[in-house]
Amino acid sequence: MKITQTSRRSFLKTAGLCLALPLMESYTAPKRPHQTKKKLIFCGLGFGFTEDTFFPQEGGRLQTLPLGMQPLARHKQDITVISNLTNHGCSDPHEGSTNFLTGANLYGTSGKRFHNSISCDVLAGESLGADMRYNQLSLTGGDGSGHGKGLSMSWSRAGKTVSGIKGPQALYARLFGQEKESPQQRQRRLAKKQSILDAVAGNSRYLNAKLTRTDKEKLDEYFQSIREIEQGLIKEAAWAQQAKPKVEFKLPKQIDGIAEIKLTYELMALALQSNQTAVISYRQPTNSLLKSLGIHQDPHALSHYSGSTTRTAASEKRDHMCTELLANFLDLLKSKKLADGSSLYEQSTLCWGSNIRTGHMLKNLPMIVAGNALEKIKHGRYLILPEEDTPLSNLWLTLLQQYGIPVDHFGDSRGTVSELFG
């Protein structure tokens, strides 16, 4: 029997046996965490920074910060600037942050077919956020300028893009919005979603025997996506009876650019403080930030500032605002207290950077690490890694292992960044 597109669709439409749901039978409603969980935060910016005025010139202790980093002066003993990291899987600067958190070779298959793999925030969230309302939160700004494919920086186990929560209004609703539906109505809604998934799942053994290798891969990806949806529904149902936290926090009417980033940082801190999640990734906006600075230039054109004093000045202005917003976020992390009396800063690791150094330069990308969740990290320095083009995945592997995630390899990693600890 020849398996056609029509018969494949018919199979998926009419198969009657239910797909086994991982963890379904043994899953129990999560209990509220009693001990402080360590947090992980990833922030990705588009188009990099100004070469001559952003990056430190000499390795070692951070003394006088360069122009672009001067807003971080009050935190210079609490941050580590890393150089010689390269995201080897990214061969096109216009891909931006597509594989920033995955380290995957996006076009490594025959025929140049795009593919990705699981991102480190999603992987970490499976463990760190297992008993919280959300495994991890994937946030994206009001514009995707400079970021390439994907709806956020997060990618599922099947290598599929994770839809990002777009803007502070949507994030506020997700964190603190109290739905008007009753618990019974919510349960019926969730049950209805579940039955839709059951209807498309079935026994794929016969079909698998008739498919090509490529089609088998596609079918496996399909069922993996179904599994991930099911697990999300199970978790949503388990948390449906738990009221969301109530906070005294009002959203302004106009939110974009600088205000959007600042407010998102504030909501990120609240999400972590209220233990709704332990892992957050944030793909920050670029175009709206420039406009709110009074810079009415295309952000891509602005990144090619060389030879133009006007564009160089605008690029430096953007750098300064980005680190000013970061400095304010670090203030927030230091001021927010957790149940055990420690601060969010003490219980967090923040990675803040870009997949591009400057212009179209993909090597030696910018990365700032902050937070004291890993007390062994020696902050207050410009760390120049001994190997040029050290895989960015080495840093992600280091953090995953330090956070107790059982993984020996991640992306294109070749080891860990032991230099962080001394």
Image: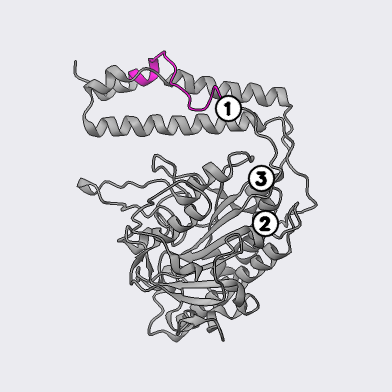
* Disc 2 to disc 1: CB gap under 8 Å: no
Disc count in the image? 3
Q: Earlier in the sequence, mark 2 or mark 1?
A: 1
Q: Is residue 364 above or below residue 6?
A: below
Image x and y of residue 52, in percent:
44, 84
Query: From the image, which quarter does the N terminus lie in?
Result: top left
Real-space CA distance between mark 2 and mark 1, rounded to the nearest whole angstrom? 29 Å
In the picture of the structure, the residue carrying the numbered disc 1 is 27
Q: Which residues are magenta?
A: 10-26
SS label for mark 1: loop
- The verdict on residue 19 being magenta is yes
Image x and y of residue 106, in percent:
31, 52
In the picture of the structure, the residue carrying the numbered disc 2 is 269
SS label for mark 3: loop
In the picture of the structure, the residue carrying the numbered disc 3 is 276
Q: What amino acid is at disc 3?
A: Gln
Q: What amino acid is at disc 1?
A: Tyr
Asked whether, in this view, residue 275 is left or right of residue 48, the answer is right
Q: Is residue 307 above or below residue 106?
A: below
Image x and y of residue 229, in percent:
50, 32
Q: What amino acid is at disc 2?
A: Ala
Q: Is residue 112 visible?
A: yes
